[in-house]
Amino acid sequence: MLKKYIGTRTFYRRVLALMIPIMIQNGITNFVSMLDNVMVGQVGTLQMTGVAIANQLVFVFNLCIFGAISGAGIFGAQYYGKGDTDGVRYTFRFKVLFGLLLTAIAITVFVFYGEPLMKTYLTGEGTTDDIAASLSYGKQYLTVILIGLLPYTMAQVYSGTLRETGRAVLPMVAGVVSVLVNLLFNYFLIFGKAGFPCLGAVGAAIATVLSRFVELLIVAIATRVRHRQNPFIVGAFSGLYIPLDLVRRIMLKGLPLMINETLWAAGIAVVNQCYSTRGLDVVAANNINQTFFNVFSVAFIAAGNAIGILLGQILGAGKTTEAADSARKMIVFSCFVSTLLSAVYFVFTPYIPLIYNTDESVRNLATTLMRIAAVAMPIDALANAAYFTLRSGGKTIITFLFDSGFVWVVCVPFVLILSRFTALSVLGLFAVNQFLNLLKAVLGCIMVKKGVWIRNMVADSRQ
């Protein structure tokens, strides 16, 4: 029975070889994002609130890019498992072109509709002056962040393809360097140190943009220099040609995934907007919770990415029985790791808000939100692992219904109705939303066990 759910040392070495670099990169990124958040929070609650609201919009864009890249990445991982370099190169080229299109659309939306969207988060309790100040800080922050959207997209294109081809260390190194740049210039520009101006929230945005360019330069230059290790890059920019059949198949499989990530992020944004109807303190407290939850959830997020890539490679090699066995063991491993980290997170929740320059009411609220999130973390890990397993075989319609479909059909209506038509506190709203994921996790396990995701999409051709 144990062998059914627990792998060999060789198995875990393979999982960890991919998982650890992703975890380190994401961990450092989220850690510096946390420090960024804390630094802005030291300036004041209103600046922190404005930045948090602007980042809700950027969050939707980031996941839209993630979905677009992941859609093509399903094919990239399977082509690599098959040993088809041309196939990997075509998927990379598709990511570049589609990523540029999405970035242009996002910049247009943020320029013309950024302010109205941010205003939807400022409908709760709070003085007119506080609301106006928070909106002003959010607008200033978003205006600068727009400059960094393009390098962010291209860096994700490179990093995604490198991971799909088993080279996760370079994206990790680029991520580490970029977040250190972010951290350094956060300190200089937020507080006005080392001769730099004191820019507060705008300084945080400038530091983030600089780090995006640094990350892109590292992955792009290193990939080109090591072209023998990364043969997909040779000739990748020599033309725009992508086999039409491959474009059709990527769009057929990838478009639902991109729409899924976008709708999922939009759904989370709507849920957070529902929380914000309970006051500006809620926006600040939830921002603290989300920031630190991201830090403590890096392990199961990295495990999910590893699941998607490794299962894609195994399926591409035609080893369907091994894929089913590996999926079961990796899901158990992901839940085990997240349970350990959730316990650590729960222990530290009373102390985390103390580092913010904010009101005691915000600190107390943030502590309770974090405790609820910590208890629910293993459930999130199970649902996340199921999602990446289903996605690895190209079952994007199923993952669309499972992920964003669940958010919009179950979570959003529940929280929306409770926030508009009851006097339930934000703690009640938050708890209901967190534990609705238990139903999602159960559904995911059922679909994984049935094996509906097991499919080799590149077996018959090298298109």
Image (spheres, rainbow, N blue to C red):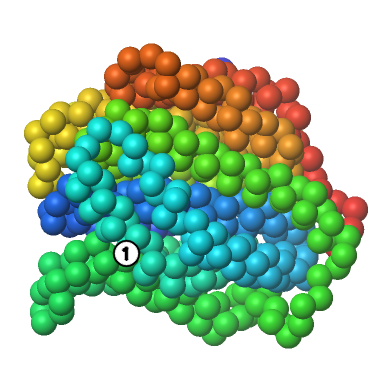
Q: What residue is drawn where x is 45% and y is 56%?
A: 114
Percent x, y for residue 425? 29, 19
Q: Is residue 131 above or below residue 366?
A: below
Left or right, residue 6 beside residue 392: left
Q: What residue is drawn where x is 26% and y is 51%?
A: 132
Along the line of sight, the residue nearer the viewer: 101 or 381: 101
Identify the image quadrant of the N terminus. Answer: top right
User: Which picture quadrant has residue 210?
Assistant: bottom left
Identify the image quadrant of the C terminus. Answer: bottom right
Residue for badge 1: 140
Percent x, y for residue 330? 54, 35
User: Which picture quadrant has residue 326?
Assistant: top right
Q: What residue is drawn where x is 63% and y is 42%?
A: 260
Q: What residue is drawn where x is 68% and y is 24%?
A: 447
Q: Name the amino acid type tagged 1.
A: Gln
Q: Is residue 105 above or below residue 280?
A: below
Percent x, y for residue 146? 44, 67
User: Which picture quadrant has residue 424?
Assistant: top left
Percent x, y for residue 188? 17, 72
Q: Is residue 221 above or below residue 138?
A: below
